[in-house]
Image (spheres, rainbow, N blue to C red):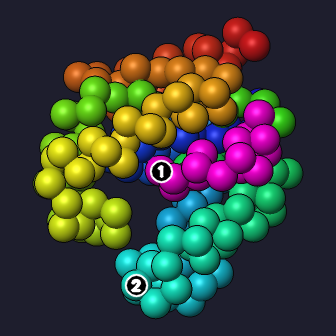
Amino acid sequence: MKQIVLIGFMGAGKTTIGHLLAQETGLTQYDFDELVVNKIGMSIADYFDRFGSDAFRAVETSILEESADLSGIISTGGGIVLKEKNRAILKEMPYVIYLKADMMALIERVVLDKRNVRPLAESKSPEEIAEVYLPRVPLYEESAKIIIETTGRTPEDIVKEILNEVGKR
């Protein structure tokens, strides 16, 4: 196992699980939010405001392409699956894991997280967040090799299941 890629909606736990997986495996964690900020030289929210969603998605694609050969744990952004090209890249990666969670649990996590402001959810109602989430579910499922249900589970239990699943393949 040289690479595990985590996908899922904002608030699914990609960063938290990625950090724990890195600790357990000794692999480096690469968090897409950090990679994007380093590449664009500003916050994601500022970039979204100045250049828009399409420009941001193009940056994400270039980082995903650069990440294809990385050895480590890669925690992607929630919208990585929106572009067909990204889904094709993900399908070529060995261990792409969809961290699936109940929609209401995700909405609660996103709304309560004041430290990690998300441009697509910042001023939206739960119904509007659901409108962003629901069309993505089949894209996450299509892109993943492994689907892990995370609702109501501890990060440690999720990490154990991921390592067990990866160990079987």
What residue lies at 36% left-to-right and 48% top-to-bottom? 132
Nearest the camera: 138 or 31?
138
Three-letter code, disc 1: Gly
Secondary-structure class at tag 2: helix
Q: Is residue 85 magenta?
A: yes
Let me know if residue 107 is in the magenta part: no
Left or right: 102 as drawn, with respect to 112: right
Residue 133 lies, with reference to residue 54, above or below; the image says above
Please provide percent x and percent y for residue 26: 64, 43
Q: Could you say whether the residue bearing mark 1 is in a helix, strand or loop? A: loop
Viewer-nearest of labels 2 and 1? 2
**Residue 39 in the image, given as x and y percentages of width and height:** 64, 81
Kindly tell me whether residue 109 is visible in this rendering: no
Q: Is residue 118 above or below residue 148?
A: below
What is the quadrant of the N terminus in the image?
A: top right
On residue 78, the disc is 1
In the rendered image, which residue does mark 2 sit on?
49
In the picture provided, is 65 more to the left or to the right than 102? right
Where does the image place residue 80, in percent across and percent down from the top left? 59, 52
Alpha carbons under labels 2 and 1: distance apart: 18 Å
**Residue range of the region highlighted in magenta in the rendering:** 76-91
Q: Please tell me which residue is depicted at 80% across the width and 62% down the height of the picture.
A: 66
Residue 115 against residue 22 in the figure, above or below: below
